[in-house]
Structures are given as structure tokens and as C-alpha cells.
Amino acid sequence: MNKGTLAVLRTAALAVAASVAMLVAGLVLGGAVAEKVIPGLGDAGVVTRWGLPISRMLMDLGGAVTVGALLAAVVLLPIEGGKNALRLSDDAIGYLRAASWCAAAWAAAAAATLVYTVADVLGQPVSDIITGSELSSYVGQLPQGTALMLVVLLAVVVALLARTTTTPGAAFGLMVMAGIALLPAPLTGHSASAANHSVAVTGVALHVAAVAPWVGGLAMLVVHASLGKGRLDIMASRFSRMALWCYIIVGASGLVNVISRLPDPAELVNTDYGRLALGKIVAFGILGWFGWMHRERTLPAVAERKPLAFARLATVEVAVMAATMGLAVALARTAPPPPTTEESPIKGLIGFDLPAKITPARLASLWTFDLFFAALVVALAGLYIAGVVRLRRRGDSWSAGRTAAWFFGLLTIVAVTETGVARYAPILFSVHMVQHMVLSMLSPIFLVMGAPVTLALRALKPAKIRGDRGPREWLTATLHSRTLAVIAHPAVATIIFVASTFVLYFTPLFESAMRNHLGHIAMMLHFLLSGSLFFWVLIGVDPAPKKLPYPARILLLFVTMPFHAFFGIALMNMSQPIAEGWYRAVLPPWGTSILKDQHTGGAIAWAFGEIPTFIVLIVLACQWFLDDQRLAKREDRKADAAEARQEEDELSAYNARLAKLAERDEKSRPS
């Protein structure tokens, strides 16, 4: 065993020891491992009380290291080969194989967490769970059990495929799969039952999605530096840029999570949960100091070929990160303080109290903070502005009309997700239908007219290393991929746009989505994405795998839009309410009957289709006219060039004839 391998093992041992120590301290101080005797409920025993948080911590560490290894292989290390012969470097292949082992350990820890979770929920010793039939019976019934089983399955798939994967695209797909596998477990914990669960769930998702690449990426940098491998300067530079954004997201989402559980700042010091959260905030500040030290000292040292300077500081930082993750697990096992006021059944379902009778003024004034869509709009607006600013600084122009269209599209998203519309949508089907129509048939029109992909292709710089893939190269590869060619085919895009609406509302899927905040976010996001895909095919300015001629686009529009009218008419003629169980549970005392409100929603769906049809027809007419103008100018230029060449040829022929006559006269002249 060489010196580098020993350094890696020492770092791993230090990280595990720090995380275990902080976990034990947090569990003891928070009282999570104290025996609780509740009459009528069984006790899972001391093995489960300690085994569950330890296995959960190992699962979190395994997930972060797996994501970090895949990140090192696909993003941090340069990709080799030419344009048509892209391949992963030998070091990247090594990290892929390491990700396979890490994913296997991740799956094993998730399986152990699953067993301990079932034992904890049922209040039975873990030995009874293993030998009995409870595990198979309750896995599908418990949300935590289903989530952990999903983690096990995804981690096993990553472990198997990472052993044979060699291409950048496949490795990128594994990294995305590993990122998805991080989310189910934390989203079924305290966040799902918090007082403001809509904000808490989104905050936890952002938190986990930023922590894993930050922690795992740094761990892989320490491994790379300890083993003395090359290109550490490139990896460290790329990680530093990514880590800054991860730090910002972790800080913002962590603050949101604390506020959603501890609305009173005094609870930070007078409750066990608050004190552990305060300790996590302190650790976050320490990690920020480490990041500043890396930028100021170790990155210049790495550039001067001094990898040990980076490894020493980063090793301590990894230990602090691992300790913070142990503290986070202890925090997750500690019950937050109960709400000071009694929570109504309606608030438990929708996350807020029942609003007053609906009026236009309340639709505009009852603002509702939806963290997911607020973060989405801010991110999309910031990225677009950054692209325009980069073009302007470079001296290039960008259409003000496209910019206005993009931000108007974002404004429509805000109008139905952050205002009173979002407050009334969970309890009134008619208002929900307004959300659906705007997100699927109005916002996408303006977003695709903003040409974000074209802006990104112009603003993003090519990779500095020849043959490598930066953001611009990954975007180009996606546009030319077979998967996108299938999805963006006009027939497929139309089927997704039309058929998904009927499948959603005329099956139990709609009620399931309304009862689960994650399902509700997925439903709303599907409206936006499916609409954007369809209108990209129709009026998109951005490059697409297949461009239809304008007559075919108009025909596709007139063929598609009647289906939404049929959908609205079907809703208006139904004699049984959709999602009746949900709407009876949230029915406001001032509201009309569920069926009548559903008929109103159907009328909205039927009438709303005229608006996007009219807008798209105007856009298509303008695009067709401008295309004809450009084509005419191009043909005129070709004709002028051909005429000029013809005149030039005739003049050349005339001059050649004169030259021959002059030569003949010269020869016939007597000497």
C-alpha cells in the first residue's frame, strides 16, 4: 500500500470518526436516543434507536461520495478525444469504478435504514422485523419505506452500470440518476409534515441537491491530490466555481428550512431542535471560511504544483463536512417543537388556513410564497440576464423583443404560482384550471419566443481544452441527441401535450397529485414543460431536431387546439366530480358545489384555448412573412451575384476577343 492510498484511508477514517462523534453528540443532546415509554405503543429497542441514525448517516455519506465520484469523472476532469471520438480519461474511468463500489455501499446502508425504519415505525425489535413478514408487508404502505426502497433500487442500478460505462453521455446519465436517488429519503421526513410543508419540502430538496456534489466533489479532490494524480489545478478550479453556488443554495435553503420549523427565533436557543440547528449554522459558517481560504491560498498553491497544500486543508474541511452531515442526521431524528396554535385539518392538507370567499381583489392580493416556482423564476431570470450582459459586453446585440417575451413569460408564471390564484387553486377546481391553462398554453408561448437556447449557445464560451465538454458542448450534444430527436418530433410533442391532460384528469393520478406536494409540483412542472415542448415545435426560434414548414405548423395548431375544447366540454358534461375525495376534504363553506365548480373549470378550459391560438397565429404569420422576406433578399443576392458573374464573364470574353484580334493584327503587320 503506497503513501497516497494511506493518506486516502486516513482521510476517510477521520471523516467517518468526525461524523459519528457529532452524530452521537447530537442524538444525546437532542434526546433522540432516550427511551420513551408511551402506553399502548411498543419500543423498537436500543439497537434501532442507535442503528437507524447511524445507518442513515452512512447512507447520506455513501450517496454524497457516489455523486462526487461521478461528478469527478464527468465534470471535474476534462473529457478527451476529438469531436467524433469523445472518451473518458483513465482517471475518470477509475472514478466511475469507484462510484460503483460507493453506490453498492450506499445501497447496503439504505437497505439497513429501511429495516430499522420499519422497526421504528412498528415499535418492534429489528430481529422480529428481519425474521417475520412485516418488512415485505409494510414497505409499500409506509412512505418512508417506499422512498428507501426506491433509493436501494436506484443505487443498485448505478453500482451495476458504473462498472461497464465508458462514454461521457452514459456517465452523465448515471450522475443524474444518482442525484435523483438522493431525494426520496429526506423528502419523507419532517419536511413532509412541517407546518408549511410546501416550503419545507422544496427547501429540503434544494438543500440535499446542493450538499451532495459539494461534499462528494471535495472528497474526490482530496483523493486526487493525495494520490498525486494530474490535472488537479483544473479540477480544483472547476470545483471552486461549483462549490460557491452550492454554498449559496445550501445557505438559502437551510435558512428556509429553519424558518419553516422554527417561526419564533427564540426557539433556536430554548429548544433541543433549535440548538442543534444553531450548531449546524455555526458549522456552515466554518465551511464558508474554508472556502474562502481555498480561493485565497490553496488554489494559487495548486496552480504552482503544490498539491499537498490543498490536501492538508481540504482533509480538515472534509472532516468538518462529515461532522456537519452527522449533525444533520441527528437534527432529522429530533422532533421540532410543536406548533403553538392548533392546526386545522385544512392547513394540514394544503399548508395554510382556508382563505376567505374568493374575489378578484383577493386573487390579486393574497400572495402565497411557493419556494419551488419562486426559485425557478429567479434562476431563469438571472441566467437570462447573465447571458444578455455577456453578449453586450462582448459587443454583440440581442433582441429586446426576445428579452421582453422571456420576462413576460416568467411574469405569467409568478401570476399563477405566487398570488391568490395559488391560494385558491388547491380548493377550487376552476382556479386550478386557470393555473393549468396559463402554465401549459400561455407561459410557454412567450418563453420559447425568448429563444433561451440560442442565447445560451451564443453566450457560453467553448471549452478551454480541445475535445473537452463544457456547458456549451453538453447543450449542443443534447440538441443533437437521439432522445431529444424523438421527444421533439412534432407527433410525439403533440401527443404529450394533448394526451397527458386526459390521462391526468380522467384517472386517479390527479387526486394523488393534489394530496402530495411533490406530486403537485411535478404536475405543474409537467404543464410548463409539455407546453414549452409543443410550442417550441410550432413557433420556437431555437434550433430543433425537426423544423416543420409553416403550412404544416398552422395545420398542426388547428388539429391540436380542438382537443382542449373537447376536454373542456367533457368536464362540463360530467355527472361525477373529479378527485371528489380531495375536494370534499377542502370544500370551503362559502364555495359552490364541487360539480358546479368543475363545470366552471371545464368552461374555462374550453374558452381559454382561443387565446393561445390567436397569439400563435399572429406569431406564425409574422415569422412566415419575415422568413419570406429573408428568402427573397437571399434570392435577390444570389441573382445579383449570378448577374454580376455573367456580366463579368461576358466582359472577360469580350476582352479576350479583343486581345486575340490585337495579337492577330500584330502578327499580320509587316516587319
Image: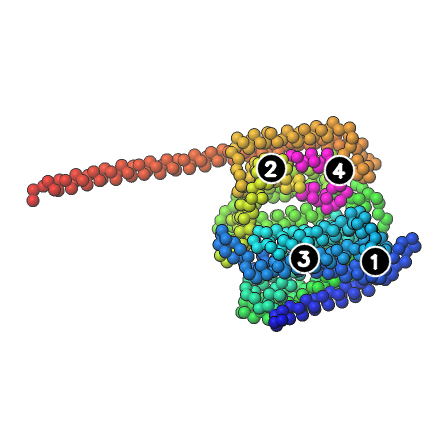
Q: CA distance from mark 2 to mark 3?
A: 35 Å
Q: CA distance from mark 3 to mark 1?
A: 26 Å
Which of the two discs, 2 and 3, labels the residue nearer the N terminus?
Answer: 3
The residue nearer to you, when weighing 520 against 73, is: 73
Q: Residue furthest left?
A: 671
The kind of residue on which mark 3 rests is Ala
Q: CA distance from mark 1 to mark 2?
A: 51 Å
At horizontal 13% and vertical 40% (from top left) the residue drawn is 665
Q: Residue furthest front?
A: 131
Task: Name the image quarter holding residue 52.
Answer: bottom right
Q: Name the residue beneath numbered marker 1.
A: 127
Q: Name the residue beneath numbered marker 2.
A: 492
Q: Pointer 1: residues within 10 angstroms few (<14), some, or many (20+)? A: some
| Most common SS among magenta residues | helix
At horizontal 49% and vertical 35% (from top left) the residue drawn is 626
Q: CA distance from mark 2 to mark 4?
A: 24 Å
Residues at discs 2 and 4 in contact (Cβ within 8 Å): no
**Residue 103, numbered circle:** 3
Question: Magenta region: which residues?
Answer: 498-525
Which of the two discs, 1 and 2, labels the residue nearer the N terminus?
Answer: 1
Which of the two discs, 3 and 1, labels the residue nearer the N terminus?
Answer: 3
Of badges 1 and 4, nearer the viewer stands: 1
**Display colour scheme:** rainbow
Q: Position of residue 232 (x, y in %)?
A: 56, 65
At horizontal 24% and vertical 38% (from top left) the residue drawn is 653
